[in-house]
Amino acid sequence: MDYYQLDTKTAADYIRSLPEMKEIFSDFDHLDVKEVGDGNLNFVFIVSNSNNLEETVVLKQAVPFLRVVGKSWPLSRERMNSEVNALRFQHDLCSDLVPAIYHSSEDMSVVIMQNLNKHLILRGEIIRGKKFPKLAEDVSTFLAKTLFYSSDLYLPADVKKQNVAKTINVELCKITEDFVFTHPYEANETNDYNPELADSSIALIQRDSAVRAAVAEMKYAFMTQAESLLHGDLHIGSIMANEEETYVIDPEFSFYGPMGFDIGAMVGNLLLSYFSQEYRQREMGNDPAEYRTWILETIETIWQKFEEKFLKLWQEHEEKSELPFMGADLNAESAVAYRKKFMEKLLSDTIGFSACKMMRRIVGLAKVADIADISDLKERAKAEEFVLRMGSNMVVNRDSFKNIQDLTALAKEMSPVGG
Ligand code: ADP
Ligand code: MG
């Protein structure tokens, strides 16, 4: 089939043409199609049977350009292959944390998946100060399983190397390399600054050689450390949730990269929210301490549960395996010693990547609404300054955090809860 760009009318015809859609829709006569407006890169349509709203799917299509900018920013639609491959891999491992796929087409760069119509994008809910009691449990499961089962700790070396080759994602990695690891620190013309943010704060990340060197090290790690099949863009806008359930969507940036990049994306986004909530909670008439404490507890629990689950998967696999990764453990202590080293390095990577994800959201092109939508620019600048101070400290000192509490303690020291 030749590619064509779907619209609200042709999307319904496309669905009608697919035999597998008969399993979802009892009839094709009352299909209602709505376009969802908040995608940055792609087109997303919700298709429902207006006679039975339980019969509903989401259809997402990549177009050969960046949707928010338009045809002047070409971007190949092969990104949908990365998304479909990652969605299938993640859904197979975590079926209640990743939407089910009903259909995909490489020709049309389309995926049709479960409509998460009882869930909302986490970022908006977190901005409003809603708590998610299962978030840390679910996100830690997602991270532990997807990162472990795609790594050399689990896969035979030949299979893993073939996977690295198959999942190469040159164009979207370049976006991350430029917009997360390069432009924000080089005063690039694509940057975007709050006029109330002091030059001295911007200089913290653009003119300090220790910070620049540390960010370059993280960029190098991102480009060379092919550890696991990452989600690649695991911020809180890629999660849809309610109090009972958590779903991870939108893995089009997926590729084989460093594990800490996915964990760091979550941690960094929660820290951005932590710094925004001092103002946001006061504006809502609340004492900020309670919600900000919940955010820091969530960060701690995500890391602790991730570590626990990842180590359990690893240990159980090695007990069954005839070929442990490091070879036979002759003194029965070497495996434990290696796992400890592994987790220390992973915490350091997580903190380093988290820092880059935070700093770029302040001066780079793409913002987070948590902070950028604070309309009082002086208040916004206060939150931004905290992020730049925290981020620059984190990336430079990433090896000196002994545990996750060292990180949350630093956040509290920078901007005390209730202080
Ligand atoms: P993009 O890659 O263009 O950023 P996303 O995958 O983030 O697109 O989807 C854009 C929006 O579409 C999401 O913010 C969400 O509101 C909606 N959406 C995407 N997937 C689903 C889904 N499976 N169920 C319900 N809504 C979805
Ligand atoms: Mg996307």
Image (cartoon, grey):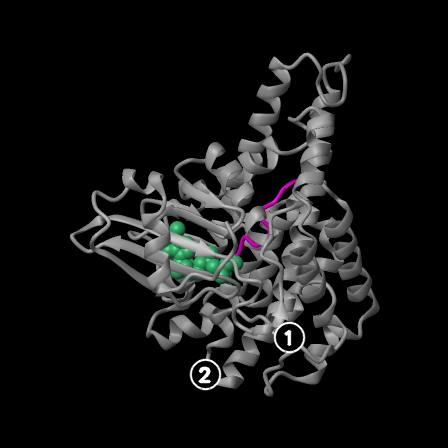
Ligand 1, by image quadrant, is bottom left
> Is disc 1 placed on a helix, strand or loop?
helix
Q: Is residue 255 magenta?
A: no
Return the residue at label 2.
375
Q: Is residue 192 above or below residue 278?
A: below
Q: Amino acid at mark 2?
A: Ser
Label total for image = 2
Q: Is residue 246 above or below residue 313?
A: below
Q: Is residue 231 magenta?
A: yes
Few, some or many residues within 10 Å of mark 1 (<14, 14–19, 20+): many
Mark identifier at residue 230: none
Residue 378: x percent and y percent? 53, 85
Dominant SS of magenta comes to: loop
Observer-nearest of 241 and 93:
93
Q: Amino acid at mark 1?
A: Val
Residue 324 appears left or right of 148: right
Residue 68: x percent and y percent? 52, 71
Q: Residue furthest front?
A: 1
Cα distance between the residues tagged 2 and 1: 17 Å
Quadrant hosting residue 329: top right
Residue 399: x percent and y percent? 74, 49
Q: Is residue 325 visible?
A: yes
Observer-nearest of 76 and 125:
76
| Highlighted range, magenta | 228-236
